[in-house]
Amino acid sequence: MAVFWVHVRVAYLSKIPESWSLLCQSNRPFVTVSCQRPAKMIKECLQFLIEPAKNLKIRLKESRKRVKSEKKQPLVETQLFIMELARELNRVCQRSDVLGRIWTCEDTWPPLLCRAFILEWGSMLESKERPMQTDGWPEKRDWKRQLLDMLEQGNEQDIETSKRIILDWTRELKTKPDRSIWPGEPVVLMLDDLETQWRKGRLPNLLPAMELVIWAVLKVAEDKETIPQHWLTKKQKNQNIDAAKYIPHTVWNWICDAAEEVTLDPDTANPDLVISQDNKRMRCGFERKDVPNYHQRFDGWWCAAGVDGFTSGRHYWEVEVGERDWRLGVAKESALRKGYKSLNTQTGYLTLRLERGTEFKALTAPFTPLSQNLIPRKVGIYLDYEEGQLSFYNVEKRSHIFTYNETFTEKLYPLFGTVEIIKDLVIRSAGAREHCFCPGPCLWG
């Protein structure tokens, strides 16, 4: 429409010089001046209109050319391998139509991700052939570093070996009498949920769906109701940082079912902290209070412990945190609480820490840096005493942040810390649930 308008204006203005020439034939000098100035102004105006239209046309051509060339880029061998694996699993596992998104190229993974996936699952399937040396999930390695080394050295042997192991496994599935496997209703619901979140852009790819299908096929003899929980537990236990970018409804509800009513113990709070009457909120005050110096009270770091400790079972609680500084996790009963000794795994603390709004870390020894992209506003803390796991989640995104793994032998107390003086650190009620991602009434309860 813009180009058409410009042409109409040019056609109309082309008649104007005829009248100007008649006026200019007179001997009036002021007419000559008025004749030249409008002509120059109109020329500049037309130039102002035409140039952007030309630039826009050039940009559109370049954009179309770029999109066309991107579509023509051929898939590399590892991407084709993932597509074929998705096709084979789609044949074996009933109701796994979500994998059709992969082998029809709707969901194409980056080559580096394909390589990492092949190495991980080749390692896991190889361990199934040997006496079990793992707990059922590939041991976490620095896949990115390993892949970069492989590219630098030009060595593809590990990739080819992993491909062969995976292909042998899929061929074995075809030879079994029962070639079609029903993964169970919980798995089907999870696959539907993962596909929905992928279509909405909350998941970068359908890799978790592929993993879940493989897991369901491998664990076919187990209780199908517990497969989703085992999938997440083993995954985050061995891939302890950012293992799941989205936790499906059924598993998230299972985690939240372990919710505890956690409260702060004022007798453990640093004298600089202000605790609310319901023992659910705390922040740093302006004056140090005169309180009894109990042996369990923190007198250095600005921390407080929960009233009740845990020696068994599953437990979950949520905390709203500030944007600048906080510390959350658990403290062992034997952990020292006096002074400013580092509150890390060596001193009996399993915690996450945010400092100065940007430094996010797990306080292992030495500490483990975490990406700023993982910084949450609401933190979910899940403790499974028997499994020896303490996991942290971003409640609003329903994603995994970090997991500690350890054999617990003593009572564990929830731990809270902050130095913020304006925004309270708030322990949420056990009955509080974050609004689910469903557009209407939640189908998963």
Image (cartoon, rainbow, N blue to C red):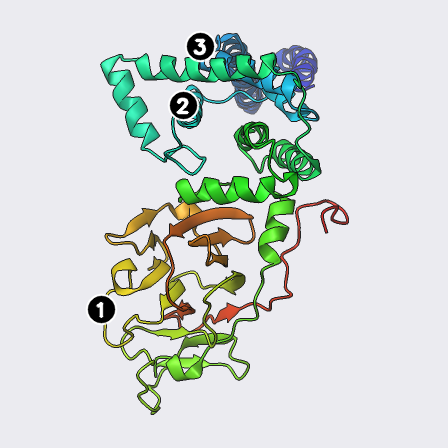
Examine the image and state in which quarter residue 191 appears.
Answer: top right
Tell me the distance, in whole angstroms, between the alpha carbons under discs 3 and 1: 52 Å
260 left or right of 323?
right
* CB within 8 Å, label 2 to label 3: no
Figure disc tally: 3
Under circle 3, the secondary element is: helix
Q: Which residue is mark 1?
A: 341
Residue 294, compared with residue 306, is above or below; it is below
Which sits earlier in the primary sequence, circle 2 or circle 1? 2
Where residue 392 sits: x, y (%)? 46, 54
Image point 47% across, 63% down: which residue? 321
Under circle 1, the secondary element is: loop
* CB within 8 Å, label 3 to label 1: no
Residue 24 visible in the picture: no
Q: Amino acid at mark 2?
A: Glu
Under circle 2, the secondary element is: helix
Where residue 218 sits: x, y (%)? 55, 29
Crowding at label 1, few (<14), some or many (≥20) Cα neighbours within 10 Å? few
Image point 69% across, 38% down: which residue? 189
Tell me the distance, in whole angstroms, between the alpha carbons under discs 2 and 3: 21 Å
Where residue 183 sits: x, y (%)? 66, 31
Image quarter where the N terminus lies is top right
Q: Which residue is mark 3?
A: 77
Which sits earlier in the primary sequence, circle 3 or circle 1? 3
Between tags 2 and 3, which lies in front?
Answer: 2
Q: Amino acid at mark 3?
A: Glu
Where residue 145 sits: x, y (%)? 29, 28
Disc marking residue 126: 2
Between tags 2 and 1, which lies in front?
Answer: 2
